[in-house]
Image: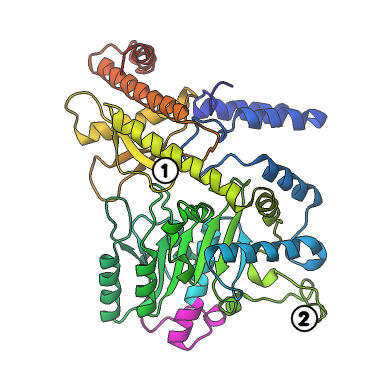
Amino acid sequence: RGGPVPALEPGELAARVAGEYAAARGTEALPRLTSLLAYGSADPADPLCAAHLHCPPLAVAVAADLAVSALNPSQDSWDQAPAATTLETLLLAELAELVGYGEEAAGVLTSGGTESNLMGLMLARDRVLGRASGRQVELEGVPRTGPRPRVFTSAAAHFSVQRAAALLGLGEDAVVPVGVDHAQRMDPGALAGALRRCADAGELPVAVVATAGTTDTGTVDPLPECARLAAEYGAWFHVDAAYGGGALLSDRLAPLLDGVELADSVSLDWHKLGWQPVAAGVFLVRRAETYASLARRAVYLNPRDDEEAGYPSLLGLSLRTTRRADGFSIAVTLRTLGREGLGRLVDACHDLALAGAAAVRAHPRLELHADPVLTAFLFRYLPRGQSDPERTDRINAALRRRLLREGRAVVGRTELPGGGPGRVRLKLTLLNPHATPADVERLLRAVAEAGLAEERAEADLAEGRAGEGTGERAGERAGSRAEEEPL
């Protein structure tokens, strides 16, 4: 294909997919639609595919995942997954030890950070709100009277915190966004002030959610300070380490997560810095007894006498019933590479991010937002001459779409917290341990070329030289000239 994505407009690709889907019949369907999927997929193994927390899975993990698909164990009862039930239990004990938890920990495989964060806030609601109200919340529901429950998380936290609050009946407005610094790291002073105002208003701090690896910058919140403040106000402490949990594999980066062992619950995602096929989320709690409100018994799946006879069930640990043995590929990968081998992959991606940030600093048309903490960083293209913030935002947004349209690169786009123009940033999330600094420099050159092409297209339109009332031809001409012009 010659690039990380197909060189088509979304509508063109949709028409092609629809045509192939309609034409695929009988024994042709598998090869034809597989070829279509391959052609129309974003390729995370391409060094110029670096927008999201979307990793190229390891071959050994893909092979293990294929075995799971063929054997099709379901983790909701022992008699559907005899070996996989024990393997998941052993794997979770190993991951709990990696986090710093003791033998009293418990957990489950999830679909990812969104499900894990929902579980953490659900347990927080049931225990903290239940204790304050004297009600069994999971049975009787959220009290309609009494202090208003509140959840505290940084302004840069994942949107799934608000979604979880909505699903749990707390309401999105129950989530209090806490101020962050330039690197999008939660400010402990702002958290202390928010908790104090909550208590003074007679409200109930239910949970403090810290982020270990924000989606945009990979920043890690100050975990020990967050844990201390949560304990001071009797709140559950949950750490969303869906991205940053991979740092625990690296001797170099693991100290960034000092304090994660103080969390009541933790989210990890091995389909990010773990190189697993989706989905490979993990949810852990420090003390197994805090899981009590999730326990369920279905007589056709986990009857009490079966468990008493030694047939264990994982049903009461998950929000789902039917559930793939997604932990199998993680277990195979850990046994194959070990923490040391996986740690080398983490370090390789961190080195790529450092090299990429240095290349941005050295480029006259690119501006770095902040040094990388993990494997991601934000930057932007600076148009020539004087440029107002709105124009800079517009060109950065457009250049990203140009790269997608041409099939050249997949670059992320986000906005800094706050208001007004000038907040749009481009993002590289480097999760390919086989990419090189030269690949990252090539990607940055493509960004600069696309930015210059957008400037020229804008100038052509302004001067009435777009050609027959359209800007697309002007953009194409600008792109060809931009590639010839030194940057």
Is residue 261 shown above or below 13? below
Q: Which residue is mark 2?
A: 304
Q: What SS does tag 2 mark?
A: helix
Quadrant in the rendering for residue 351? top left
Instruction: Please give the range of residues in magenta.
Output: 126-150
Position of the N terminus by quadrant: top right
Q: Position of residue 273 (x, y in %)?
A: 53, 48
Alpha carbons under labels 1 and 2: distance apart: 48 Å
The residue type indicated by label 1 comes to: Ala
371 vs 327: above or below: above
Q: Earlier in the sequence, mark 1 or mark 2?
A: 2
Under circle 1, the secondary element is strand
Residue 140 painted magenta:
yes
Say which residue label 1 marks: 376
Residue 95 placement (x, y as % from top left): 60, 62
When the figure is inspected, residue 460 is found, relative to residue 89, above or below; the finding is: above
